[in-house]
Amino acid sequence: DFLDDEPKLAAVVQYMNKRLTFDGYELRRVGQTLKVVALATNTAAATALREKAKALDLTSVHSDFERALTEADADPSDAITAACSTVESVCKCILDEMGKPYPTNKDINGLVGEVAKHLNLSPGRDDLPKEWEQDIRTILSGLFNVVGGIGSLRTHAGDAHGKGKNPVPADARIARLAIHAASTVSLFYIETWQRTITRATKD
């Protein structure tokens, strides 16, 4: 009844969310509709990624990530697929902004590897401070493993591919694992890209 009256709609949503919060849910706008979403997906990284994507006008990233967040409980398989798509969209947006072509292999591993190359995020980089060189290399190696896991999970548990006669259904817990992992990787890549831009501007 309030869709054509934005101030009234915002007031109703705010009123509802004050009460839904007690049960671990909130109303969230997704495109032109409002959906009830579990707050369990609102980690610090997820919240920061949503804000970054919106502020930087990364429309595809925002769309994919909102889909992942809203479908975690209702459709875990779709949420897993959307989490993987979020990372892929982040990589494509960064490559677009940097004026770099997409790699021949445009799956999550190929895209992340290409962006890592341009952002100097290779675990083998040799320009790190000696005090925490090995620590950063370990984390960067871990990020590549996480990315591979997200891509494999999308193949085996997401809804991007066909299923056999006895598919094993994913649950919300696994969907949220993929979402949190994807948001951490995506946020780190966006912030690194922003840092690269800042340094280039100063130089």
Image (cartoon, helix red, strand yellow):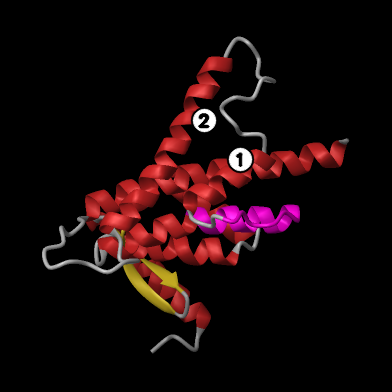
Q: Position of residue 155 (x, y in %)?
A: 32, 57
Q: Which residue is mark 1?
A: 116
Q: Is residue 189 left or right of residue 25?
A: right
Residue that label 2 marks: 140
Q: Earlier in the sequence, mark 2 or mark 1?
A: 1
View extreme (front): residue: 104
The Cα atoms of the two marked residues, 2 and 1, are separated by 10 Å
Residue 179 can be seen, yes or no: no
Q: Does 158 sit above or below residue 198?
A: below
Q: Amino acid at mark 2?
A: Leu
Rate crowding at label 2 as few (under 14), some (14 to 19) or many (20 or more) other CA atoms within 10 Å: some
What are the residue bounds of the magenta stretch? 87-104
Q: Residue at x 48, y 57 (%)?
A: 86
Q: Is residue 197 above or below residue 107?
A: above
Q: Secondary structure at mark 1?
A: helix
- Answer few, some or many: residues within 10 Å of disc 1's Cα (few below 14, many 20 plus, some between 14 and 19): some
Residue 171 position within the rendered picture, expressed as x and y whole percent measured from the top left = 20, 55
Task: Kindly identify the amino acid type of the residue bearing the numbered disc 1.
Answer: Ala
Callout 2–callout 1 Cβ contact below 8 Å: yes
The residue furthest right is 203
Height in image: 122 above or below 45?
A: above
